[in-house]
Image (cartoon, helix red, strand yellow):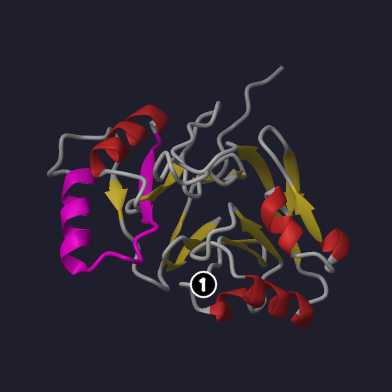
Amino acid sequence: MRLIKYGHACVGLEKDGRRLVLDPGGLTDPRVLDGADAVLVTHEHVDHFSEENLRRAAEANPALRIWTDTSVAGRLDGLGGRVTAVGHGEAFAAAGFGVQVHGTWHEVLHPDIPRVGNVGFLVDGILFHPGDALTVPETPVDTLLLPVHGPWSTTGRLIDYVREVAPRHAYAIHDGALNDTGLAMVGGLLGAAGPGTGAPYDRLAVGTGVDLPSAPAQPSA
């Protein structure tokens, strides 16, 4: 499986000629949806979800399927069975990828700001995209997509989060609002120069990718 960074919180996964796109929001070039077989959306915020772009993509590709939380699904009315609302604990197949859902809520921005729903996606038992939450799946994670910057987090919390998830590798996402100085500061603390997370940390440049290992072997019955 190949991981491709498309910008901010959006990534693509490619396997066996199929392509799955996660969180193609308003900060991402809408062309990332061209040729996509399926889309996963963690929550309703504009940097993760663009109704206009998803509707345009669905119109261009009648076979496109979308899985997301109930709030986003409600805003995509008219697409019928092509949109499926999912919640914590559910599992499904999307364009040949196995997906498990973990988490329910977005991280707290401020006590006076109502929380919105947020679902994280574990794909093929390998890669976890948490959206805007620091959800710890109840299963091992090989590759963690780490949201490195947001109004709801600090780098210190992220260090503890990576330690708790204990992935083999962490890759930066949710970094579209950081300039080069901010990226260097965050990367220094999450990388080898910081206090240590227990996992190598990397940031892919937009448009670049990396091949991920195969799914871990399942224990025999």
- In the image, taking residue 163 as reference, residue 83 lies left or right, namely right
Q: Give percent across and percent down for residue 199.
A: 31, 38
Which segment is the magenta one?
Answer: 167-190
Q: Is residue 25 above or below residue 193?
A: below
Residue at (41, 31) in percent of width and height:
165
Q: Which residue is mark 1?
A: 26
Tell me if residue 62 can be seen: yes
Residue 186 lies in magenta, yes or no? yes
- In the image, taking residue 178 as reference, residue 118 lies left or right, namely right
Task: Find the residue positioned furthest to the left.
Answer: 193
For the residue labelled by badge 1, is the local secondary structure a helix, a strand or a loop? loop
Residue at (27, 43) in percent of width and height:
154
- In the image, taking residue 192 as reference, residue 13 lies left or right, namely right
Number of residue marks: 1
Residue 75 lies in magenta, yes or no? no
Q: Is residue 82 above or below residue 189?
A: below
Q: Which quadrant would the C terminus be assigned to in this image?
A: top right
Task: Find the residue positioned furthest to the top.
Answer: 221
Residue at (49, 35) in percent of width and height:
135
